[in-house]
Image: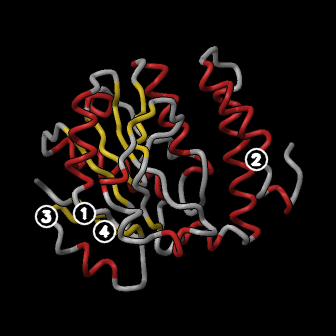
């Protein structure tokens, strides 16, 4: 097992912790989550890894989750990742009791998730070995939030026909949720609108039912549009 850590230009001392990893990656500036995750994927490929668990640094991990996610993913050869959903953003701190984060709450698996669980998920490396990466160009490079996980899922689904599994029951606590905390800034609202336009430009013409559903959701999801109208 190798621990790959990526510090994305932080100034809070996180880089000192990342240096303790067996494979540290230290960026001097915030290159964005897509770019950082792609760096981690490249490092895992260099290690000839068969599986990769991605976990954001501000998430409280559930003990035993890596093995549980790996086991479910290995059961399903038609899937490329298995992951978890977070608590609702309003209620997550109150709901994040030890019981609610325990695997005894596991109630099964759904495979209709239209997202790659890059915040908290186990991935098979085959799609990455074939060249798939998170989209990290244009507004998806640098600070921002939104749609990169959906883009990755649709890309893998279109190219390989593989599914994304969500384990029902246990949920994780996103302790800081820094992207949500900063999204009220005008620059990040503008970034969301640019990401939204790029996403629709790429996927609106797809015949994939998942892509059509995601585009419909993206058009309707206007919480960051208050700073200006979409073009």
Q: Viewed as shown, does residue 18 lie left or right of 50?
A: right
- Front position among marks 1 and 2: 1
How many residues crowd around disc 3 within 10 Å: few (fewer than 14), some, or many (20 or more)?
Answer: few
Residue 66 lies, in percent from the top left, at 24, 52
Q: Which of the two discs, 1 and 3, sits closer to the camera?
A: 1
Element marked by disc 1: loop
Residue 13 on image: x %, y %: 34, 85
Q: Is residue 168 above or below residue 127?
A: below
Query: Is the residue under label 2 in contact with that under label 4 (CB below 8 Å)?
Result: no
Q: Which residue is mark 2?
A: 221
Q: Specify which label sits upstream in the sequence, 1 or 3.
A: 3
Depth order, front residue of 98/205: 98
How far is mark 2 from mark 3, CA to CA?
A: 40 Å
Q: How far separated are the C-alphas under marks 1 and 3? A: 21 Å
- CA–CA distance between discs 4 and 1? 27 Å
Asked whether disc 3 touches disc 4, contact meaning CB atoms under 8 Å apart, the reply is no
Q: CA distance from mark 4 to mark 2?
A: 34 Å
Q: Nearer the viewer, mark 4 or mark 2?
A: 2
Q: Quadrant of residue 197?
A: top right
Task: Please give the label number shown on residue 63.
Answer: 1
Q: Which mark is residue 22?
A: 3
**Image quadrant occupied by the C terminus:** top right
Labels 3, 4: front one = 3
In the rendering, which numbered label is found on residue 26? Answer: 4
Above/below status of 69 relative to 155: below
Q: Residue at x 71, y 44 (%)?
A: 196
Which callout, 4 or 2, points at the residue further toward the start of the chain? 4
């Amino acid at each position: 097992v190798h621990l790959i850590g990526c510090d994305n230009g932080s100034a809070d001392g996180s880089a000192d912790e990342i240096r303790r990893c067996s494979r540290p990656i230290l960026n001097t500036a915030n290159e964005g989550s897509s770019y950082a995750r792609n760096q981690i994927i490249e490092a895992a490929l260099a290690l000839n890894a068969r599986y990769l668990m991605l976990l954001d640094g501000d998430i409280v991990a559930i003990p035993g989750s890596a093995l549980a996610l790996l086991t479910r993913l290995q059961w399903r050869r038609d899937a490329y990742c298995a992951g978890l959903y977070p608590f609702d953003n309003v209620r997550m701190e109150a709901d994040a009791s030890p019981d609610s984060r325990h695997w005894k709450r596991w109630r099964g698996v759904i495979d209709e998730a239209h997202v790659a669980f890059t915040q908290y998920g186990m991935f098979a490396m085959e799609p990455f070995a074939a060249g798939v990466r998170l989209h990290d160009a244009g507004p998806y490079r640098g600070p921002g939030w939104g749609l990169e996980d959906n883009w990755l899922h649709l890309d893998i689904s279109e190219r390989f026909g593989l599914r994304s599994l969500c384990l029902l029951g246990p949920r994780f606590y996103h302790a800081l949720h820094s992207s949500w905390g900063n999204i009220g800034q005008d620059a990040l609202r503008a970034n969301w609108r640019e990401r939204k336009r790029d996403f629709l430009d790429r996927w609106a013409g797809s015949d994939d039912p998942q892509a059509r559903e995601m585009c419909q959701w993206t058009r309707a999801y206007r919480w960051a549009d208050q700073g200006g109208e979409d073009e």
